[in-house]
Image (cartoon, rainbow, N blue to C red):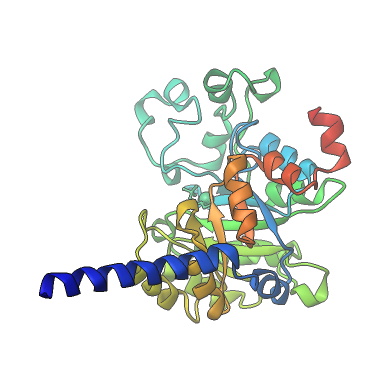
Amino acid sequence: MEMKLAIVIVILFSLLLSFYGAYYLINPDQRGEEILSKQGIPYPTVIAHRGASIKAPESTAEAYIKARDLGVDYLEADLQRTKDGEIVVFHDQTLQRTSNVEEVFPDRKEDKLGSFTYQELKKLDFGSWFNENSPRYGSEKYEGLGIITLEELIAIAEGGQQTPGLVLETKSPEKYPGIEREIVDILEQEGWLDTAAERDYTKTIFFSFSEESLRGFKELAPQAPRILLVTDNMITRRSWTHWLERAAGLADGLGTKGFMNWPWYIAEAHDQGLFVFPYTINELWQVKLLAHFHSSGYITDRPDVVLNFFDRMSELSIINDG
Ligand code: G3P
Ligand code: CA
């Protein structure tokens, strides 16, 4: 008898869960657009991850120019600091994967970026590795590409027919004490921290896995939206609640791995006024699925795929990209 009761309870519980899931699959929460609009962020937001980094070497001028000319809303960039204090755009801790450091500084090939001066980094080629790794998209023009600074990234964003905003990530900020102040100073000087009310959209969004770093930005530039990046690979309901609690009062949105973006999780984030941007969305089927769930945004290495899906490719990019 006890066994039968247990089976009935399990069946009822499973049915309840299925109805709950089916409800959200059929009626996904649509409050993302409204939440973004309060922040002055366009919906759905297309963010080029390290630039158009499938078709050009990541984090270089070429990757960002390509993404800008495609018509993305934001360029995503990882920021670190050189030994002599320049803020540069670079993802990895070390230089080996995406430069010829081994050739130029053989004794320092495993050293961290922060141990190199800006002039030393300027000697490196950050493009040729891409031609070897991606012959399909490789090009002679990528040979010898240099590292870029935050100021150069801003100039790229401002240099086209359309001006995308910037999603700026502090990479390992604990290694660079005070980097938030330095980033904010540059953005202020360049007029990139005006509020959305002062212009037609929000130009700068801060992005970090580090809550400490987001706290810094909240204090220094409270007008700019902040996104807390979620580190869990496999999210559970309990850990999702935990992330929502961590974001409360600190962030305006969460950046999550694509498969965490189940619509019932998104609805819970929306209940708290948080938007959710999934990363890294590179396949068309992912875009279609997330679009069905009214995803707030798409962080992607392939902005052409996302923009094409939304019929938003710029005329310039159609001419240049074919
Ligand atoms: O888009 C989120 C992403 O930027 C965080 O991961 O390692 O690519 O910087 P990562
Ligand atoms: Ca990043």
Given residues 243 and 115, the one toward you in this image is: 243
Q: Quadrant for the N terminus, please.
A: bottom left
In the displayed structure image, the side of residue 163 where residue 187 appears, left or right? left
Quadrant assignment, res 62:
top right
In the displayed structure image, the side of residue 79 where residue 61 appears, left or right? right
Estimate the x, y position of residue 285 in percent, counting from the top left.
59, 42
Given residues 226 and 272, the one toward you in this image is: 272
Name the residue at 69% across, 58% down. Answer: 45
In the displayed structure image, the side of residue 61 where residue 240 appears, left or right? left
Q: Is residue 71 above or below residue 194?
A: above
Name the residue at 87% across, 47% down. Answer: 161
Q: Quadrant for the C terminus, please.
A: top right
Evaluate whether residue 106 shows in this view: yes
Estimate the x, y position of residue 208 in percent, counting from the top left.
49, 61
Name the residue at 82% across, 70% down. Answer: 199
Estimate the x, y position of residue 101 in percent, counting from the top left.
46, 27
Quadrant assignment, res 236:
bottom left
Name the residue at 82% across, 46% down. Answer: 159
Q: How many marks?
A: 0
